[in-house]
Image (spheres, helix red, strand yellow):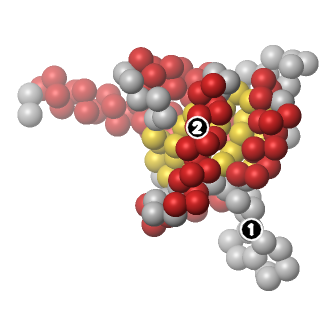
Amino acid sequence: MTLEEIVACDNAAQKMQTVSAAVEELLVAAQCQDRLTVGVYESAKLMNVDPDSVVLCLLAIDEEEEDDIALQIHFTLIQSFCCDNDIDIVRVSGMQRLAQLLGEPAETQGTTEPRDLHCLLVTNPHTDAWKSHGLVEVANYCEESRGNNQWVPYIPLQER
């Protein structure tokens, strides 16, 4: 490996950590401000009613779920809709970390079904111009990725 390749790898790893932290910050802020829609079905309903309010779509899946054909079909349809409506899309892994960030209970007590965390939408109502540092960072990363012909960038969420 040349020095340039080593530096490029270090920069890419650092960039990924920065974007991963921005995603986490954004999700927490969005949930606190009631700007987060959770679940494939709930997300589809919102995008059908008000697609202009959606600023980011996160599709979350772990390696063991990659073979779930139904989930992959949902993701394909959601990605297509997002592309048609100029909504930034990011794929993330680390469902356990995602559940921690969103305050999901570790174990459900049999009375409530856990929320479907496979699709998350961050919304920005037309009435205000909410900008979080995390949203700006993630949007810039999505734009940069599209410039490199990576239409749906992948970001691993690190377990803590």
Say what secondary structure mark 1 lies in: loop
Residue 124, visible in the rendered structure:
no
Q: Name the amino acid, label 2.
A: Gln
**Residue bearing the label numbered 1:** 114
Q: Residue 81 carries which label?
A: none
Please give left or right for residue 115 compared with residue 136 in the image: right
In the image as oriented, which residue stretches furthest toward the bottom? 110
Q: Nearer the viewer, residue 3 or 80?
A: 80
The relative height of residue 72 versus residue 112 in the rendered view (above or below) is: above
Are dots 2 and 1 in contact, CB under 8 Å? no
Residue at (68% x, 71% y) in the render:
106
Pair 2/1: label in front = 2
Residue positioned 46% across, 47% down in the render: 156
State the residue position of label 2: 79
Q: Is residue 133 depicted above or below 26 in this figure?
A: above
Q: How many marks?
A: 2
- Mark 1, Cα crowd under 10 Å, few <14 / some 14-19 / many 20+, is some
Distance CA(mark 2)–CA(mark 1) = 24 Å
